[in-house]
Image (cartoon, rainbow, N blue to C red):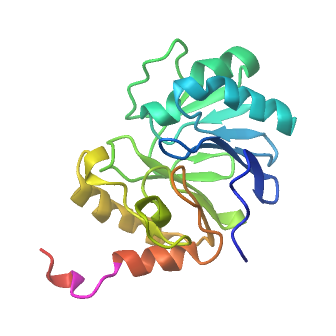
Amino acid sequence: MTNPDTSDPITEVAPDVYDLTLSDEPARYRSFLFDWGTPTLIDTGPHDTSQKLLQRLESVGIAPERLLLTHTDHDHVGGYDAVLDKYSPETYVPAQSELQTEYGADHRYEDEDTVGPFTAVHIPGHTQDNYALIADGKSIAVLGDAMIGADWRGLPEGYLIMVEALYSDDLIEAERNAERLQEYEFDIGLVFHGSSVFEGAREKIDSFLDFPNKGTWD
């Protein structure tokens, strides 16, 4: 499968899965909308793209009934209050998150909890509240900021790398915890920065994490 054209603000990247691109500058910011049973919005972008997010949702014509955060960096939680004001979805936030918003969380989730079709996988390191969300039945992983698209760092599109140390609490911890992704099977890896991977995402993560002489790095 070739990568869908995610240069458009709204792209259906898999059946009933919408990439809502909010900004290309200074970085690519996104939300993802899943129209599976209970329409679910994952992350809300930065605060200054809140109106764009609402416009994208209006254009798709699907009202989110569930709002799920992967973590609470500013570029993932900035539109939280705006979405609550307009749609009043049921909210799910990591147990480790400090939510500095007008609205609180309806639910707090932890490692290996399920939220609808998603299994929460705690991958601290980038931040302590960072999660990936795995939809086993759909072969899709929403990677939070456990991984980003390699093209964000000038490398070929279609591969995944770690978030920069500059933006991470502990990059070594992040890389070691990313090994938890290898416990799950998925073909598509959706990221919030850079380009997502639409074929062989888990195998590409394996290749990145299982580097030569890895057993001697301690």
Q: Is residue 152 above or below residue 81?
A: below
Q: Is residue 213 above or below residue 43?
A: below
Residue 62 visible, this orientation: no
| Residue at x 69% of width, y 29% of height | 52
Q: Residue furthest left?
A: 218
Where's residue 155, x and y in %? 44, 70
Q: Is residue 81 above or below residue 153?
A: above
Is residue 160 inside the magenta stretch? no
Q: Residue furthest bottom?
A: 212
Foreground residue among 193 and 187? 193
In the picture provided, is 43 more to the left or to the right than 96?
Answer: right
In the picture provided, is 134 more to the left or to the right than 90?
Answer: left
In the picture provided, is 212 more to the left or to the right than 149?
Answer: left
Main SS category, magenta section: loop
| Residue at x 38% of width, y 53% of height | 123
Where's residue 18, x and y in %? 75, 49
Quadrant of residue 139 in the image? bottom right
| Magenta region, residue range | 210-214
| Residue at x 69% of width, y 54% of height | 7
Residue 14 visible, this orientation: yes
